[in-house]
């Protein structure tokens, strides 16, 4: 297990290979440009209303109309926030972005020089440096991504 940091984020070349082994890479600097659809999930008001109706709970028509309006308003707000993600620039955000680009470039070079047998990729901005409170979710996402990569490798 190796963690290369900023200058060598995926140091595959330092792994001592033996015949028959499998080189596995867990890459956390994957493509970071997310379409808006992946940044937020629109509210499925109609689906939720159908679930409530199916359960037998009566929903007044005026409530249905208000819920539909509220859902549209929240969707517009979330879509605008998703668009604003790329617009906020400061000295710190610029330095952070430059570092991220360097990490991505170094990772791509490492993958070209020493291609792994199994390669799982997590989007670079799926989580940030200070998401300590999200450890369980990060681990679960990593396990899911690695499981998918292993399945792909085994089905070759």
Image: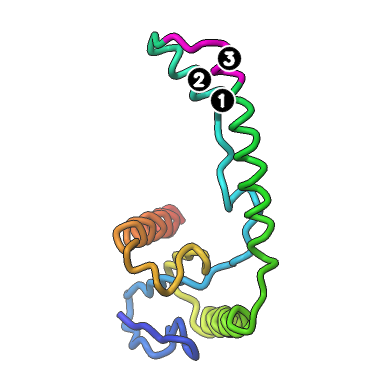
> Helix or strand or loop: what does disc 2 sit on?
helix
Real-space Cα separation, disc 3 to disc 2, in angstroms: 13 Å
Q: Are marks 3 and 1 in contact (CB under 8 Å)?
A: no
| Eye-nearest disc, 3 or 1 | 3
Q: Nearer the viewer, mark 3 or mark 2?
A: 3
> Residue at label 3?
62
* Residue 106 figure quarter: bottom right
Crowding near the residue tagged with mark 1, few <14, some 14–19, many ≥20 C-alpha atoms within 10 Å: some
Q: Which color scheme did the rendering employ for the protein?
A: rainbow
Relative to 86, is 108 on the left or the right?
A: left
- Whether the residues at callouts 2 and 1 have beta carbons within 8 Å, the answer is yes
* Main SS class of the magenta portion in the image: helix
Q: Residue at x 56, y 22 (%)?
A: 46
Q: Which residue is mark 1?
A: 67
Point out the tag, 3 or 2, that comes first from the N-terminus: 2
Q: Kindly identify the residue that appears in the image at 66 percent across and 69 percent down.
A: 88
The magenta stretch is 58-65
Q: Secondary structure at mark 1?
A: helix
Q: Judge whether 39 appears above or below 121 on screen.
A: above
CA separation in Å, label 2 and label 1: 9 Å
In percent of width and height, residue 23 lies at 38, 75
Q: Earlier in the sequence, mark 2 or mark 1?
A: 2
């Amino acid at each position: 297990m190796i963690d290369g940091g900023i200058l060598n984020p995926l140091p595959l070349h330092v792994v001592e290979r033996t015949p028959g082994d499998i080189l596995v890479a867990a890459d956390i600097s994957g493509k970071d440009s997310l379409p808006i659809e992946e940044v937020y999930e629109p509210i499925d008001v109609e689906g939720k209303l159908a679930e409530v109706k199916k359960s037998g709970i009566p929903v007044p028509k005026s409530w249905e109309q208000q819920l539909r309006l509220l859902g549209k308003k929240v969707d517009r707000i979330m879509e605008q926030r998703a668009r604003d993600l790329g617009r906020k620039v400061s000295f710190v955000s610029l330095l952070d972005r430059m570092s991220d680009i360097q990490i991505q470039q170094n990772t791509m070079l490492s993958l070209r020089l020493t291609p792994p047998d199994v390669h799982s990729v997590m989007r670079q901005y799926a989580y940030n440096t200070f998401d300590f409170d999200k450890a369980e979710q990060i681990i679960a996402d990593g396990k899911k991504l690695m499981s998918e990569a292993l399945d792909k490798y085994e089905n070759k």
